[in-house]
Image (cartoon, grey):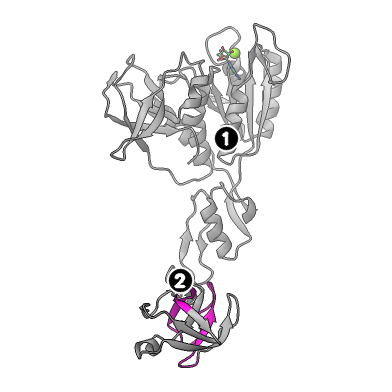
Amino acid sequence: MLSTTEAREAVLSSMPEFPAEVTPVGSANGCVLRQIVRAERDQPPFDRVMMDGVALRFADVEKGAREFPVQATQAAGDPVLALQPGSCIEIMTGASLPGNADCIIPVERISLRNGVAVIDDDYEAKIGQFIHRRASDHSAGAHLLAPGKRISPMDVAIIASCGLTEIEVSRRPIVRVISTGNELVAPGAPIKPQQIRLSNGPAIQAMLMERGYAQCVHDHLLDDLDELRERIAVHLAEADVLILSGGVSMGKADFVPGVMAELGVNVVFHKVSQRPGKPMWFGIGPKKKAVFALPGNPVSALVCCRQYVIPALAAASAAAPQPPEFAVLASDITFEPDLTCFQPVRLVSSAGGQVLAVPVKTNTSGDFTALSATDGYVELAREQDHFPAGTAVFLHRWRAC
Ligand code: AMP
Ligand code: MG
């Protein structure tokens, strides 16, 4: 049986690379950038006034002048005026510094009397104050964003500031989420006492959509060989990635691995030395289409989705690898050896600024209600069976951050 590290490496090395495509900047948030973004202009593009007030020459203030006739008014976006010695120009935040001016006095520190700005007696001005100098952030042509960056709202600001309306990103994969099980009944449909509400599919879709994989459609299939064969063949033909839940254990109705073999999906691994999620199956189909078959138990399905599917989609989207995250155990944990344990945790900050992981017990791997109070899970390596409080361990958060 593969270790969790081997399974993760096997998944990452099997994934294809999704092609690049051009997308409008308005829908680029969350996509992975596939081009360099260079500055269109200096930033700021001119000496930018940072305060509403008056622009003047510091040399005049230095000589003792406190009263300055207002020569004109210049707002943001107005053509740049040239200041006459001894005068001031009424100026607004965002305006380009008038010629000859080198000092801004904020409006709060002047009084305007009959077209003359009088500086408060107790106010001490400095040369160059409240001027954001041209190119002090970066120069035209500077590399601002590199391929592999997951585009954030801050990056959208940068891209827009470069004057771009479109940007090259990784194409978002077409994903099919398939819940298998005769006992499953979708929300909204009548249910019998022996049946189970279908919850994995919507949860997996939510986890993917939160990370920007919006082309994600769900299907429910019965534990029926013909139906599985027929519908999975269609999904394989239409989608880039399949994520199944259920049907991969040792039960008589666990048909998924057999059906995959019939459809030409080559198994990369079946079973990982982990709890929860031991029965997980992963394979690669025709045209390098990835098929993740997660165990049906809800905690297992969510942990395996976060642990394997999310990093795989990021890698195939050519996202730059993220550094691992750590948390410090808030209490001792002891568990059965030989299987890596993914322990759900709630995070709290210690007074010393550490991220503390408080273990949250789940009542078997079917108890998904307990997960609502958790922020993620920690990975406790199978080589050890006792982890004292204070141990630093790998943390995997549920939410994209
Ligand atoms: P399986 O892996 O198919 O043997 O399913 C294991 C357990 O998970 C069973 O108790 C199933 O009823 C439950 N289960 C499977 N799929 C889902 C699902 N989509 N939503 C909720 N529970 C599920
Ligand atoms: Mg089942």
- Whether residue 29 is in magenta: the answer is no
Q: Quadrant of ligand 1?
A: top right
Looking at marks 1 and 2 on the same chain, the residue that comes earlier in the sequence is marked by 2
Residue 353: x %, y % from top left: 31, 40
Q: Which residue is mark 2?
A: 139
Rounded to the nearest angstrom, the CA distance separating label 1 from label 2 is: 38 Å
Residue 358: x %, y % from top left: 37, 26
Task: Choose between 354 and 157: the one closer to the eye.
Answer: 354
Q: What residue lies at 59% left-to-right and 23% top-to-bottom?
A: 200
Residue 331: x %, y % from top left: 30, 23
Quarter-wise, where is residue 126 in the image? bottom left
Task: Choose between 338 and 156: the one closer to the eye.
Answer: 156
Examine the rendered structure and indicate whether residue 165 appears above or below residue 80: above
Quarter-wise, where is residue 376 in the image? top left
Residue 53 is at least partly visible in this image: yes
> In this picture, which residue range is highlighted in magenta?
84-110
Residue 314: x %, y % from top left: 51, 40
Mark 1: which amino acid?
Leu
Examine the rendered structure and indicate whether residue 400 appears above or below residue 97: above
Residue 263 is at least partly visible in this image: no
What is the number of the mark on residue 208? 1
Quarter-wise, where is residue 220 in the image? top right
